[in-house]
Each structure stands twice: as C-alpha cells, then as structure tokens.
Amino acid sequence: MNISIFGLGYVGCVSIGCLAKNGHHVIGVDVSQIKVDQINAGKATIIEKDIDIIIAEQRAKGNIEATTDSKEAILKTDITIVAVGTPSSDKGHLNLNYIFKVAEVAGLAIKEKKDFHIIAIRSTIMPGTCDKFAAIVEDASGKKRNVDFAIVDNPEFLREGTAVEDYYNPPLTLIGSDNSGAAETVASLYRQLPGEVIITDLKIAEIMKYVNNTFHALKISFGNEIGNICSEMGIDSHKVMEIFCKDKQLNISPYYFKPGFAFGGSCLPKDLKGLQTLAHDLYVSVPVIDSINKSNELQITRAVDIIQHTQKKRIGFLGLSFKAGTDDLRNSPAVAVVETLLGKGYSVKIYDKHIHLSNLTGTNKVYIDHHIPHLSKLMVKDAEDLIKDVDVIVINNREQEYLDVLEKAGDTAMIVDMVRLPEAIRNKNNYTGINW
Ligand SMILES: NC(=O)c1ccc[n+]([C@@H]2O[C@H](COP(=O)([O-])OP(=O)(O)OC[C@H]3O[C@@H](n4cnc5c(N)ncnc54)[C@H](O)[C@@H]3O)[C@@H](O)[C@H]2O)c1
C-alpha cells in the first residue's frame, strides 16, 4: 500500500521504517527540513535500537522517501498516518495545534484528490478530536466525511528504548472508527503482527491511551509507596511485589476493574486503614494510598447525588449488604447512602433477601445498630411490595430475584443502578447507571 506519515519524530520514524520493512511504500512528511533530509539520506531521525539499520535498508531499496510537501504526499498515497506531536500546554491541556494544522493541509490536498482517502491518527489525542479533525478537513476540502475520506483513530503503544521491538510485538492493535471499510484497511497494515486487532468506537479508542498511561503511572507510584513502607521496616520490597504479581486471580487480573459503586465490607476498608496507619507511624508519606478512601467516599456522594437528582422522595433499595450473596452490612456503602438520605428527610424502604434482622449477630449487628438503629422499620418482606411503594428503585446487589422483579416492574419508578443491570433494563427511559 502507499502510505504517507506526517511527523518524523519517535513514532513517525519507527512507523516509516517498520511499515516499509513490511512491504509498503512510505512517504514521510515533516515541517523540519533537517528530518526530511535525514530520511532521504537513509538516516534515522531518532536514536533507537535497530531503527538506523531499518531506515538505511529500506531507503536503499527505494521503499521510503521524505518531503516537506504535504499535498504531494497525500495525492500520491491511499492512507495518511498522523504522528505529529501533541505536547501539554502551560496549563496542562493537550496542545492539538499541530494535529489541526495537518487537518487543514490534508483538507486542501483531498480537495484535489479523486480517490477516497483514509487518515489514521496515531498521535495521542483527547476524545472528540477525530470529529473536530474531520470537520476541518470537510471545511478545507469541500468534501464529505465517509463519502470522500474517512478518519480513524489508531493509538500507538510503543515505548522509547524498545520502540522497534514494541512495534512488532504490540499488546494489541486498536482502531476506533465510524467507517468499517476504513477500519479494515488500517487493520490490514497490522494483521501480520501478534496481538488482537480491536475495532471499536472512535471515542473509546481516543481515551484508551490516557487510561493505559494513567494506570501505568498509578502502578509505578503504588509500587514505590509499598517499597517505601517495606524498606522502612527492613522488608525486601522486591520480594513482596514479586509475590504480589504471582496472584493472577485477584491482583494481576481483570478482577476489581469494573466501574461501579464504592467498595465496602469488613476487609478492604479495615486493611487499607491499617496500611495507612502503619505508614503514618513510620513517617512514610503515601499520598496515593491515602487518596483511595477519599475516592471511595466520593463514589458514595455520587450515588446520593444521582438519587437526589431524580427529585423524588420515596426511595427503595434492593440489597443493602456490601455485596451479593451475603448479609454482611459492615461498611456497606449502601448503608452510608441510606443514612445520608434519611438525614435529608427521604422516605426509605429496603428489601434484602439475605438480611433477617433476628439473625444478625456480633460486629455486624453492632455496626447496623450504630448506623441505622431503626432498620427494622425500613425493611419490607417482599421485593414486589417494595417496588409498588417507591418512586426510585436503587439496585445495590446483583441478585437474580431482584433482576426478575425489575423486569416485571413498569416504567413508573426510576431505576438507579449500582451493579450494571442487563442491557434490556439499561435501555429503559427511566434508568440511570452510576457511571456508565
Ligand atoms: N514517543 C513515544 O514514545 C510515543 C509513544 C506513543 C504515542 N506517542 C504519541 O505520538 C505522537 C508523536 O510523538 P513523538 O514522540 O513521535 O513526537 P516528536 O515530537 O518526536 O515528533 C513529532 C514530529 O512532528 C513534526 N510535525 C509537527 N507539525 C507537523 C506538521 N504540521 N506536519 C508534519 N510534521 C509535523 C515535528 O517536526 C516532529 O518531527 C504524540 O501524540 C505522542 O504523545 C508517543
């Protein structure tokens, strides 16, 4: 395929070399004459393992060339890959000026082009940028998106230092698009590489790089804070994290990664507090770990806000325990929501199939007596009765009995979902999810 690549920095230089090595003819475009001259002289524009050899070889074979003439590059190619810089502004916002400049020049070239043109944005961009890019191309070209050209987002996951190796071994290839033909064409550039090719919505692809890199930063800071606590106590932090990483069921796994309601129960809040106190007593500052509970409390506030936003006063809860399949009410975030609503004068009714007040004992009973002493007056014996009597149903545990009742319920009561109910219920008009 004939491909043009805008931006001959780290991402562009690796892409031009590796795509040429995989059999494509690639034209590099940059505003820097020096970088263009380097590529045309068979030299890499960056220091990176193996890329100098690849660029020299591919230039000698005539598979790559470079120019500052963006129009000519677009007219001669079928796909344009955008790999220009997206630095932070002084205030921390993303500076998309270089991206939108490319959109303008691409539009002027597409104006003169007869064939359909595909633009794949490889730079890291904020959700919504592809749509703005397409609007600029439409304005400059007078042509129509998805009739004359298409925009896809194709974020790059390589790391400097191992960029060529990462190019050939991506964890996955991600393509966001509103045009299946264009997505398939871009996917075909990477089909011979290992890793799943995922084609998804534009905005999902656009936000992915931020989600990944923020998580990587969080992992590093978490590991460092654990290391700082361990080293103060003479514990080998590397052995600790080695064992931590061996648990592939709960630690290094998809478990606990579903957006939803706050955590609770007898263990997570208690042990988090325990580690915070340990760090405090050792005079070790752990801001990442210290912020976890604050974030959790905000999730409880978010639930209260959503319920208040319905402007209804009679609220029913399906499930009160901290998770499905248990009667444990200790540190259940739903208890905190009920307590807050009662304090604000709401009428609350609760059905929980596992909670029989006469059976509650020990710390579980002490906890609930302290937080909602008159719980017995709020509990009802039947889920169907509860639904008839309230304006808002808050579903707090994913129990089959609750799902069955909700399916039968009419549309009069609003549903506030903490557990991600099945799609048929999520599609109802009277429905709100906590964060989806
Ligand atoms: N460097 C990385 O490890 C890495 C990894 C993944 C994603 N990314 C993302 O990829 C994008 C590019 O990063 P980079 O590190 O390669 O940037 P870079 O600064 O090394 O290179 C960007 C190049 O774009 C050129 N350029 C600017 N405006 C242009 C225009 N209008 N037309 C043509 N060329 C133009 C610049 O002259 C420069 O050579 C960024 O969005 C970055 O966040 C970078």
Image (cartoon, rainbow, N blue to C red):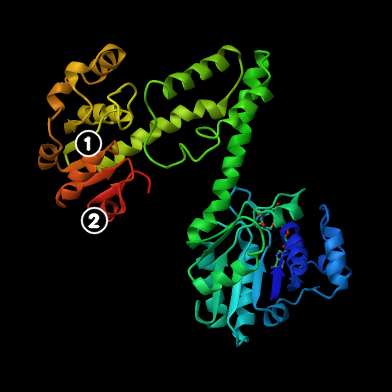
Please provide percent x and percent y for residue 359.
20, 17
- State the residue at coordinates (20%, 45%): 404
In this picture, is 380 found above or below 81?
Answer: above
Q: Residues within 10 Å of mark 1 (few under 14, many from 20)?
A: many
Looking at the image, tell me whether mark 1 or mark 2 is earlier in sequence order: 1
Please provide percent x and percent y for residue 320.
26, 30
Q: Where is ligand 1, by quadrant?
A: bottom right
Q: Residues within 10 Å of mark 2 (few under 14, many from 20)?
A: few
- State the residue at coordinates (83%, 55%): 50
SS at badge 1: strand
Q: Is residue 45 visible?
A: yes
Q: Nearer the viewer, mark 1 or mark 2?
A: 1
On the image, which quarter does residue 64 sit in? Answer: bottom right
Which residue position holds label 2? 429
Q: Quadrant of the N terminus?
A: bottom right
Please provide percent x and percent y for residue 361.
25, 13
In this picture, is 342 found above or below 57?
Answer: above
- State the residue at coordinates (43%, 42%): 258
Number of marks drawn: 2
Judged left or right of residue 172, residue 380 is left
Q: Is residue 135 visible?
A: no
Q: Is mark 1 within 8 Å of ligand 1?
A: no
On the image, which quarter does residue 33 sit in? Answer: bottom right
Which residue position holds label 1? 318
Check disc 2 and give the amino acid type. Answer: Asn
Nearest the eye: 14 or 127: 14
In this picture, is 209 found above or below 153?
Answer: above
Check disc 1 and give the amino acid type. Answer: Leu
